[in-house]
Image (tube, grey):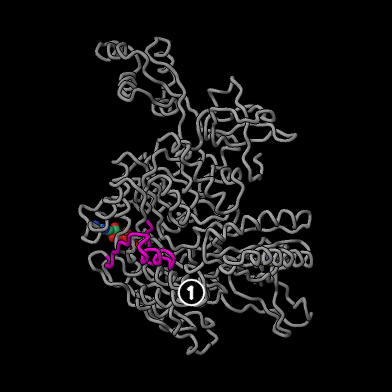
Amino acid sequence: MTLPVRETYSYSVPDALRQAAGIGRRALVPFRSRNVIGYIIGIEKQPPEDIKGVKDILDILDGEPLFHEKSVSFFQWMADYYLFPIGLLIKSALPGGINKKVGPLKRICIRVKDDAAVKRILAGDKTKTGPKNEREFLELLFSSGMLPLNELSSRFSNGLYLVNKWTKAGAMERCSEVFFRDPSGELLASSSEPSMLFDQQTNALKSITGCLDKGTFSVCLLNGVTGSGKTEVYYRAVRHAIDQGRQAIIMVPEIALAMYAEGIFRPRLGERVAVFHSGLSDGERYDQWVRMARGGADLVIGARSALFSPFPRLGLIIVDEEYDPSYKQEESPRYQARDSAIVRGRMENALVILGAGTPSVQSFHNASKGRYRLITMPDRIEKRPLPEVSIVDMKDLKDTGRGEGILSPMLQNALKETLASGNQTILFLNRRGFSRVYLCRSCGASMKCPNCDVTLIYHIRENSLNCHYCDFHITPPDKCPSCKKGPMKAFGFGTQKLELELQRLVPEARIARMDRDSTRRKGEIFRLLKDFNDGKTDILVGTQMITKGYDFPNVTLVGVVSADLSLGFPDFRSGERTFQLLAQVAGRAGRGEQKGKVIIQTFNPLNYAITSARDHDFETFFNKEKELRGQLGYPPFSYLACLRFQGNDKAVTEAMARRMGSEIKKITAGWPKRGKEIQVLGPVESPMAKLKGKYRWQILIKSKGTSILHYLLKEVDALSREILKKSGVGMVIDVDPYQML
Ligand code: ADP
Ligand code: ZN
């Protein structure tokens, strides 16, 4: 086990382990009264002055390093910045398989031992007396040098006999070879390399290779509209880094996009591509990790955890769709993979490319301040037009009862037309489940989760009311549990209901749904995307999982069923999030030769995020957003940290949050000058006051500078250990928070 301690400890290396000890290996060490596992992050040649209390390492657990010396300073930075114990950080960065001891598999192989002998046999006539296929067997082995035994025995019915015969004769021998599980079977959409680049791609690439050739750290923001051909630029940049003898990381925000990117890169780079994301089994992740640490791969494609890839000579990190909130890990350690990628790039003198069709406000702000080099690709390839976007004001629609106002007549007609013309449609609705609330028609009471401060969502397939935050679910009651009288009715709609409504509206269409519920089984995401890619599906319904990255040329219609869901979030980024979702999903339409069309349904047709998305106008959106953030003092004009308190007892949780709040205010009041740069907001009850059975309070800290904020957070961290000790209330520090619910 690894301990949650913040400090690092020194141990001495007994002579017997001197050879084995090295940075990046795990060591078994005595700690207090137990033996625990630690990671070696540094080796001192000189023993420390005070050597008395230093104990011996008991054992070294790895025969080769799991990470390199350069990664150590990166781990240290992360532990420090996100206030997280370094041992646990390293543990979470390493693939889970390591601790479960699922080492690489070994397999038995047969190899040629005596080259000359086999040559002689093949040259002579000796094989004529043996079995008919003996010559073929020998030739195959001779030309490949070594083959797995199971392959030989499946290829030759008498394979085992032949192997025995020739090993006895001394011409061949058995050996065992480590092999890596290959996680990727079929590829989603492999594409061939285009013979030439378009001008904007050539220009972008020129800037990028220029940076790579300098061999120093820098950041490029590649702002290319959807369909401008960024992938091809990434590919050439990766190849340039490989030609320099360095390695590259490509990060994408979702597992499905990693599979998609693999389909593009693997056919071109073959064996030298590794993949790393949570869609792989522990064993597969372990294999990929070891392969990278050994220098057996040039490129890794993965989700945010790929950031830690143990490449010995990292030269390039690409963060695709850099604006995506899923780069923020919402469980411990709470890190922002895009922001951390920039730090890792700096430490390794690597180039970092942030790619986006719609950059984040933060990255675009940094580029406009000259901190990042801005590279723009303003056109779709072949100057194909961006889709025409129409907004439907849902307030104008009368609820006719039929379909309960899910799809406006405009969207219905467009759907039918698209279907008739043989093209494909994407319908985006960012709410899964069947309906939103389950209400009593007599007293109006709704069904809520007993553990969380949210209403339960009806799921028709399982006929159950589910909580989307914990695993609570019940069968819907017939009568209201509150007034015991009224019948219950479902209101609102989610993806399941949309799917049903479509089946009624266009029964001839082949409809598929992609959301968290429909993709729980391994391989399901892949199958859904593959069918859509192969034209076996006409309409794909889904949550934000379907909005970004993909290139499906036959999609000519995109419908946004409700643009208001993300706008309603109590979060300063809700406008940005809405703009990005709309611009991204709109970017799926009309990527092929036919023009695309987008229909956005909303109750807020005049909102700037929605109108800017309609006009494909990032600049207007950015300027408006920047002005609002400036007025309210939100990032990028300040730095935030959210302190979250959680406890089983309501009153104690509140009391502890209040106590911490007043202590923190005392600290900043004691800093006469710089204290004014910091605002301590709260404590307040969290918008989601109860989650998974725990009561929640929070404090938001806003600061003008990042170093003063971190100085304060360290004090807060130490303070909390003192004040909250044995109170049953825990505190989590969320640095640069994305979710403040
Ligand atoms: P983006 O990631 O910027 O949205 P993609 O990289 O998916 O765009 O490119 C859009 C489409 O253009 C893809 O189908 C891709 O194969 C094609 N494409 C990109 N570059 C070229 C090129 N140089 N020649 C021909 N087709 C290209
Ligand atoms: Zn719940």
Q: Where, quadrant-wise, is the C terminus in this rendering?
A: bottom right
Residue 128 appears in the rendering? no
Along the horizontal axis of the image, is 161 left or right of 643? left
Q: Tag 1: residue type?
A: Arg
* Left or right position of 295 against 333: left
| Nearer to the camera, 115 or 634 | 634
Observer-nearest residue: 438 or 54? 54
Which residue does the image show at 70% across and 35% down from the upper left?
A: 31
Residue 272 falls in image quadrant: top left
Image position of 282 (left or right of 684): left
Residue at image point 31% right, 66% down: 591
Q: Position of residue 501 (x, y in %)?
A: 51, 75
Q: Position of residue 197 (x, y in %)?
A: 22, 56
Which contiguous range is marked in magenta?
Answer: 353-380
Which residue lies most toward the front here?
A: 672
Q: Is residue 439 above or below residue 316?
A: below
Q: Residue at x 36, y 59 (%)?
A: 372
Can the viewer see residue 707? yes
Locate residue 584, reporting x and y percent: 40, 68
Q: Is residue 269 above or below residue 304?
A: above
Report the image quarter containing ligand 2.
bottom right
Cβ of mark 1 under 8 A from ligand 1: no
Check residue 658 for magenta coloring. Answer: no
Classify mark 1: helix, strand or loop: helix
Which residue in the protein does label 1 denote? 629
Q: Going by the image, does 114 lie left or right of 567? A: left
Residue 274 x %, y %: 42, 43
Q: Nearer the viewer, residue 723 or 221?
A: 723
- Within-10-Å neighbours for mark 1: few <14, some 14–19, many 20+: some
The residue positioned 77% from the left and 66% from the top of the image is 655
Q: Which quadrant is home to the N terminus?
A: top right
Does the magenta segment cover residue 366? yes
